[in-house]
Amino acid sequence: MIIILKQNAKLESIKNLKATMIARGLTIHESIGDFTGIIGLIGDTSKIDMATVASMECVSDVKRVSEPYKAANRKFNPLDTIVNVAGRKVGEGFFSVMAGPCSVESEEQIIEVATRAKAAGATILRGGAYKPRSSPYAFQGLKGDGIELLLKAKAATGLPIVTEITSIANIDLYSDVDIIQVGARNMQNFDLLYELGHSDKTILLKRGLSSTIEEWLMSVEYILSGGNNNVILCERGIRTYENATRNTLDISAVPIIKRLTHLPIIIEPSHATGKTWLVEPLAKAAIAAGADGLMIEVHNNPSCALCDGAQSITPDDFDKIMVEVKRRVQFEGKILS
Ligand code: PEP
Ligand code: MN
């Protein structure tokens, strides 16, 4: 349920309203802008009489929210959320480019890619340390050592870092990581989401391989309901019958997520397509559709990559793509941040 406050509502009256709702066992979610004030109620509101609430002095309107996601719902929070990542902004006019290898492989590799990515205009360095692989025989990542190497690349370039978590047991290793990625395979790892909701880390939540948008938003809700509002969504392609690409990029997810929620969404054309030549056109499509950023896999030697070489572009190609990206981001009136 959402309660829309009168513009000139008195503070005392709002306080009374909130106290009444808290006494009924509900959690309050407040969104007070310059011109609108909204109180969102989370919990069992079935016994709340809408007419009684509507008659309260400070109340302009009362509406039930039928969607099962509440804190993520734009009705609860009409203004776009801007997520702060080590001083860089993501969302509402601030465009982020996260680039780097699928996996961290060595110090030389990650420093070289980070340096080239930064020079081309990337704003955040990506790199997998804990890798969820379909095969137990495939390279599983450098794990804790990989995080150490990412931190070295962060120190060398000043770029914030994003890396995936696969188990909450390793959370202590992520204390200097700027964004914790929850990968597609863990989108419905509810224990992990619950714990991350009780942390103060920024979370990049990728869409599950076969998840609907509503399932994705319910996973977001696990994080937000724990009190952590720093969430960025990432559309990385979903499974369909089409096999010309590794996955099918659901570009419509961008305007849909923007309509349904207040959170930033980025597009990842690398996993979405599995093909280097499709990265540029889909990056352009993402910007045109209103995405708040991109994640792109870049490797200094893709043919020797230990993971996802076929979709990883070279630093030279990344330079070229970034020229186009910057031009289009500027055309949209956004700032690369
Ligand atoms: C990755 O970012 O390297 C990764 C494994 O992504 P996804 O979860 O989208 O497959
Ligand atoms: Mn990958």
Image (cartoon, rainbow, N blue to C red):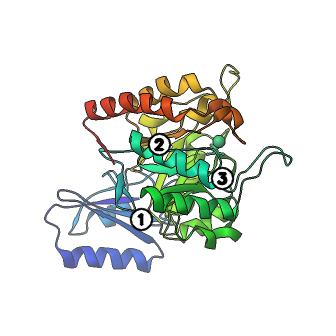
Instruction: Decide which of tag 2 and tag 3 comes sooner along the chain.
Output: 3
- Looking at numbered disc 1 in the image, what kind of residue is underneath it? Leu
| Label 2 SS | helix
Q: Is residue 257 visible?
A: yes
User: Are the residues tagged 1 and 3 within 8 Å (C-beta)?
Assistant: no
| Label 1 SS | strand
Q: Which residue is mark 1?
A: 41
**Residue 260 picture location, percent across and down:** 43, 44
Residue 314 shown left or right of residue 189 in the figure: left
| Label 3 SS | loop
Residue 332 shown left or right of residue 118 in the figure: left
Camera-nearest label, 2 or 1:
2
Look at the image and tell me in which quarter the N terminus lies.
bottom left
**Residue 117 picture location, percent across and down:** 46, 43
Give the alpha-carbon distance from disc 2 to disc 1, as whole Å. 47 Å
Between 57 and 186, the one lying in front of the other is 186
The structure residue drawn at horizontal position 62% and vertical position 26%, both measured from the top left corner, is: 275
Q: Quadrant of ligand 1?
A: top right
Between 32 and 249, the one lying in front of the other is 249
User: Are the residues tagged 2 and 3 within 8 Å (C-beta)?
Assistant: no
Q: Which residue is mark 2?
A: 116
Residue 155 shown left or right of residue 288 in the figure: right
Residue 10 shown left or right of residue 92 in the figure: left
Instruction: Decide which of tag 1 and tag 3 comes sooner along the chain.
Output: 1
The structure residue drawn at horizontal position 61% and vertical position 55%, both measured from the top left corner, is: 107
- Looking at numbered disc 3 in the image, what kind of residue is underneath it? Ser
Give the alpha-carbon distance from disc 2 to disc 3, as whole Å. 16 Å
Residue that protrudes farthest toward the front in the picture: 108
Q: Which residue is mark 3?
A: 106
